[in-house]
Image (tube, rainbow, N blue to C red):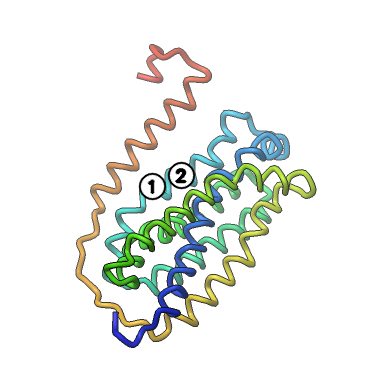
């Protein structure tokens, strides 16, 4: 990062990251209160509707390592630009989904954007904050994570009280466009030293397999005994 980047610019970069991180964590918890409503609308069993949340979490966690390395090669502007694009497009798909499978696809696309936010956040803070302020920057980013997780159920319940479950995704759309606007505006002249990092494909696939297996077992336990061959 060059010396000409001011203190004001530092917080502009941080704001872009904090908005993305907040939205990514918010959408991991905001849908919980709406699951029964969504299950009724799509006529899906309650144990299957849980995959609206699980598909998001699985995709996000599986891609963290990949996008962390990828952002080192492509830069934070690339990560946030495509992060906001994927997150917003995924939200739009969820709003207009008429089939349960389409809703899951929208959630997975959302999670791709969310994974970009989560993967680059700590590195971006380290890059834009001076060494003596990095603890402060990381603390503020952790607050964005906590705020997203804690406010999700309450905000979801509030939206569901007045509007349909689609409103949970509708609120993401203007925020996504706003984040994309900030990214193009403030990262336009940002100078970052890029690194040739190896993308951990094998590690990411391994994490995905372990998480998917665990989630499938947890889902099937509602209908089968723990010693049933299908679980083992």
Looking at the rendered image, the quarter that the N terminus falls into is bottom left
Q: Which mark is residue 98?
A: none
Q: Position of residue 72 (x, y in %)?
A: 27, 68
Is 179 on the left or on the right of 212, as rendered? right
Pointer 2: what residue?
57
Q: Toward which corner of the image does residue 209 lie, by quadrant?
A: top left
Q: Is residue 71 visible?
A: no
Is residue 215 or residue 13 the one in the foreground?
13
- Looking at the picture, tell me which residue is in the foreground, 75 or 215: 75
Residue 200 visible in the shown view:
yes
Q: Residue at horizontal 39%, vertical 36%?
A: 212
Image quarter (top left, top right, bottom left or bottom right) of the C terminus: top left
The structure residue drawn at horizontal position 61% and vertical position 57%, both measured from the top left corner, is 93
Q: Are marks 2 and 1 in contact (CB under 8 Å)?
A: yes
Q: Residues within 10 Å of mark 2 (few under 14, many from 20)?
A: many
List x then y, in percent, for residue 130: 30, 72
Furthest residue toward right: 162
Q: Nearer the viewer, residue 103 or 19?
A: 19
Q: From what the image shows, is residue 49 above or below residue 142?
A: above
State the image quarter where residue 225 is shown: top left
**At 31% across and 60% down in the image, what residue appears?**
68
Packing grade of label 1 (10 A; few <14, some 14-19, many >=20) is: many
- Residue 175 at what x, y percent from top left? 60, 66
Residue drawn at (37%, 61%) of the image: 136
Residue 211 image point, x, y percent: 37, 37
Label 1: which secondary element: helix
Q: Which mark is residue 61?
A: 1
Dot 2: element: helix
| Left or right placement of residue 1 versus residue 86 in this view | left
Name the outermost residue toward the front.
Answer: 132
Q: CA distance from mark 2 to mark 1?
A: 6 Å
């Amino acid at each position: 990062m060059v010396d000409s980047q001011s203190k004001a610019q530092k917080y502009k970069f941080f704001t872009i990251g904090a908005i993305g991180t907040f939205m990514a964590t918010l959408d991991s918890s905001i849908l919980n209160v709406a699951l029964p409503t969504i299950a009724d609308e799509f006529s899906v069993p309650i144990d299957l509707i849980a995959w609206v949340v699980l598909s998001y979490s699985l995709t996000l966690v599986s891609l963290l390592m990949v996008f962390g390395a990828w952002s080192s090669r492509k830069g934070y502007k690339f990560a946030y630009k495509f992060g906001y694009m994927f997150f917003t497009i995924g939200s739009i798909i969820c709003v207009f989904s008429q089939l349960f499978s389409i809703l899951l696809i929208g959630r997975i696309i959302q999670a791709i954007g969310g994974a970009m936010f989560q993967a680059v956040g700590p590195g971006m803070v380290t890059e834009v904050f001076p060494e003596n302020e990095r603890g402060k920057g990381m603390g503020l980013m952790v607050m964005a994570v906590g705020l997203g997780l804690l406010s999700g159920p309450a905000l979801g319940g509030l939206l569901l009280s007045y509007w349909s479950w689609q409103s949970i995704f509708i609120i993401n759309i203007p925020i996504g466009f706003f984040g994309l606007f900030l990214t193009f505006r403030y990262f336009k002249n940002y100078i970052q030293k890029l690194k040739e990092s190896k993308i951990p494909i094998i590690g990411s696939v391994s994490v995905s397999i372990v998480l998917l297996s665990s989630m499938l077992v947890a889902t099937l336990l509602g209908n089968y005994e723990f010693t049933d061959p299908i679980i083992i």
